[in-house]
Amino acid sequence: MRSPQPSSKWRMMKSKKILRSFQVRSKAMKNVHEYEGASGGVLDKAMIKKKMRVLRHLIPGATFLVDLCLLDQTLDYVISLRAQLDVMQKLMKTLNVRRSK
């Protein structure tokens, strides 16, 4: 037994729906490109690339990391530096207390 074929009216409605979705998407993309042009999106992207390159050189072992991994590694490195700073501050406090006695 064959399944019934969709009616031509149904196919036409489906086609119009698909066409509308493409029109909405293309209009949205056009707006994005206009926004980027107005705000200097190309310059922003170049600046971000430059800053990411600098960050790669600042973070040990991050030379060949992908951007998201680089940001994750940067967070870990900053946390590590903060912990080292806390240890050094406590050490200085301890040494200053001993000197004052």
Image (tube, rainbow, N blue to C red):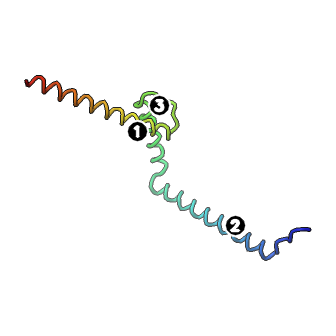
Residue 52 position (above or below residue 23):
above
Three-letter code, disc 2: Ile
Q: Which residue is mark 2?
A: 18
Numbered disc in front, either 3 or 1: 1
Residue 46 position (above or below residue 19):
above
Q: Position of residue 36 (x, y in %)?
A: 49, 55
Q: Position of residue 89 (x, y in %)?
A: 22, 31
| Residue sticking out furthest to the left | 101
Compare marks 3 and 2 and give the one earlier in the sequence: 2
Q: Position of residue 85 (x, y in %)?
A: 28, 31
Q: Which mark is residue 62?
A: 3
The answer to which image quadrant residue 26 occupies is bottom right
Describe residue 9's horizontal placement relative to residue 38 as left or right: right
Three-letter code, disc 3: Ala
Q: Separation of disc 3 and disc 1 at Cα? A: 12 Å
Compare marks 3 and 1 and give the one earlier in the sequence: 3
Q: Separation of disc 1 and disc 2 at Cα? A: 43 Å
Q: Residue at x 86, y 68 (%)?
A: 3
* Tag 2 secondary structure: helix
How crowded is the residue under tag 3: few (<14 C-alpha within 10 Å), some, or many (20+)?
some
* Tag 1 secondary structure: helix
Describe residue 82's horizontal placement relative to residue 47 as left or right: left
